[in-house]
Amino acid sequence: MKTLIHNAQVIADGFREIPCGAVLVEEGKIVALMPEAEWTAQAENADEVIDAEGLRLTPGLIDIHIHGAAGEDLISGKAEAAEAVSRNVAMDGCTAFMASLTVVSHERLLEILRGLAIVTDLPGAAMLGIHSEGPYLSPDYKALMDERYLRDPSLKELQEMVEAAQGRLKVMTVAPERKGMDGLIQAAVQAGITVMVGHTNATSADVHRASLAGAAGFTHLYNAMSQHLHRDPGTVTGAFLEEGMKAELIADGFHVDPEVVRMTWKHFGPQRLVLITDAMLGKGMPDGDFEFSGLHCRKHGQHVQVVETGRRAGSAIGMNDAVRMMGEMCGCTPCELVQMACVNPAFLAQAENRKGRLAAGMDADLALFDKQWQCRATMVEGRWVYRR
């Protein structure tokens, strides 16, 4: 089936924009991008012609850090949870996500990995793989993680995780200061896992060693990590120094102060930042109480906090909210926002050869947005999965 979408502001990637253009899709792939003046030549052979009426047409957004949505937590390891997240995020213009897991026992983690490894044919956004946030993290910056299961790395455990996930364990967050972590990072990278630094009390020197070992980025920069202190340079200092590493950012104005977001934007720029939601199961649900990572949490609007301590407990924002708020805080162009919400996450998810950009031969993962980044329609691999 051929679909032609025309009369759109086409944002192809972090650099290319067609102010008024068209995109041709066939058999789940993008065939061509063209200026509006050329679309009529393609219309006769198209099965479906859509007038975008000036809407913004972008690659589908990609959330590489989401724990749940619509009342379902991905830590269940069940297909039903992945299906709920898939449907929910598609309404935000998100076409792909990573199933992010909090810390549990090793035996339980293997069960979860086996369950998620066989999840396919989702109704909305595609699941690119699994992100294990831990278990080799720092108790000093555990945040919501269950301290009982935090420990030094084990190459034997890593191999068991890789085997249980059947090649779908794509991202792991680690604390580089833990004993034996250099070897774990190297082994994880060799196994095809993108290693992120987070939930860590690392010094900037620890971060540098992790970078040399193959670590590729930082999990929710600033949150749950040692900070930038002038006589005690921590993980944040290392993030500013290691310019080859990317950094996730929760740009909701709540997890990180807008002034710090602006400072980070100024120094990191669109090539390094990766917008995420860190959303939990309360996303898309009415305000109320939820259990997340074994803790009693309360959702109010787009914010979630632990009832007992008031600590932030993930978010309830969508990727389109992250994009809109980042644009409002920093004045980013649409191309820069697409770089941070599509191109960069595709790179960390090891899917950059097929997702994250609008170009011939790429998967037909598309989203139509209005100027306020409200999603009007979402296409995943050539199939419309959401229309407003």
Image (cartoon, grey):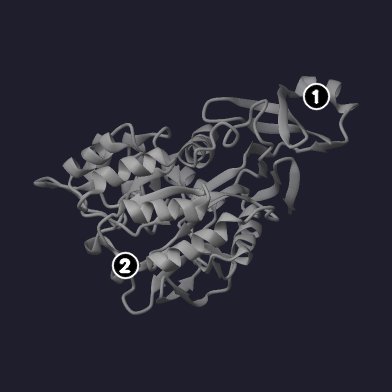
Question: Residue 44 location in percent, x, y?
Answer: 91, 26
Residue, x 67% and y 55% (percent of image)? 122
> How many circles with numbers are drawn on the protein?
2
| Three-letter amino acid code of the residue under disc 2 | Tyr
Front-most of residues 31 and 302: 31
Residue, x 38% and y 40% (percent of image)? 189
Question: Residue 225 location in percent, x, y?
Answer: 26, 54
Front-most of residues 23 and 115: 115
CB atoms of marks 2 and 1 within 8 Å: no
Q: Is residue 262 visible?
A: no
For the N terminus, give its image quadrant.
top right
For the residues labelled 2 and 1, the Cα–Cα distance comes to 57 Å
User: Which circle marks residue 39 in the picture?
Assistant: 1
In the picture provided, is 138 more to the left or to the right than 121? left
For the C terminus, give its image quadrant.
bottom right
Question: Residue 210 location in percent, x, y?
Answer: 26, 41
Mark 1, Cα crowd under 10 Å, few <14 / some 14-19 / many 20+, is many
| Three-letter amino acid code of the residue under disc 1 | Trp
SS state under label 2: helix
Front-most of residues 362 and 132: 132
Question: Residue 37 location in percent, x, y?
Answer: 78, 20
Residue, x 80% and y 37% (percent of image)? 51
Does 158 sit above or below residue 300? above
SS state under label 1: loop
User: Which circle marks residue 149 in the picture?
Assistant: 2
Residue, x 41% and y 63% (percent of image)? 102
In the picture provided, is 372 more to the left or to the right than 201? right
